Amino acid sequence: MFGLGPTELVMIIAAALLIFGPSRLPKVGRQIGEAVRSFRGIQDSTTQVKKKVQKDFEDMILGPPENN
């Protein structure tokens, strides 16, 4: 996962526990999860817009697709 081994993951978790404390860690994890979900949603939306714009340009240049 992301090129991290088990030792690195343990170090990151230990650092997070020291910085945020065990009581705030679930809340921080939840907020990070929501941010990642939001980012993926935005990424999917921009991909859809890109595909639509590309198709519209192709239709303008090549003409609409012919139905046989």
Image: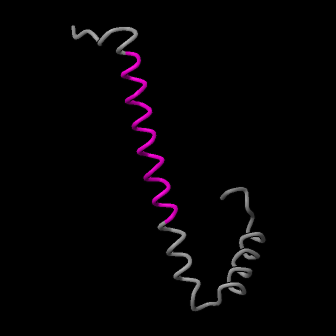
Q: Is residue 54 left or right of residue 18?
A: left
In the picture, the quarter occupied by the C terminus is top left
Whether residue 62 is situated above or below residue 5 in the rendered picture = above
- Please give the name of the residue rendered at 72% of the width and 74% of the height, measured from the top-left corner: 12
Q: Position of residue 35 (x, y in %)?
A: 51, 64
Magenta residues, as a range?
Answer: 35-58
Q: Is residue 44 left or right of residue 3?
A: left
- Please give the name of the residue rendered at 43% of the width and 46% of the height, measured from the top-left corner: 44
Q: Is residue 14 left or right of residue 50?
A: right
Whether residue 3 is situated above or below residue 25 in the rendered picture = above
Q: Is residue 30 magenta?
A: no
Q: Position of residue 66 (x, y in %)?
A: 26, 9
State which quadrant residue 53 falls in.
top left
State which quadrant residue 28 falls in.
bottom right
Q: Is residue 54 magenta?
A: yes
- Please give the name of the residue rendered at 53% of the width and 82% of the height, measured from the top-left corner: 26
In the picture, the quarter occupied by the N terminus is bottom right
* Residue toward you, 61 or 25: 61
- Please give the name of the residue rendered at 72% of the width and 87% of the height, measured from the top-left corner: 18
Q: Position of residue 3 (x, y in %)?
A: 73, 56
Query: What secondary structure do most residues of the magenta stretch adopt?
Result: helix
Q: Position of residue 6 (x, y in %)?
A: 73, 69
Whether residue 41 is situated above or below residue 45 in the rendered picture = below
Q: Report the number of discs.
A: 0
Give the color scheme: rainbow, by chain, secondary structure or one colour: one colour
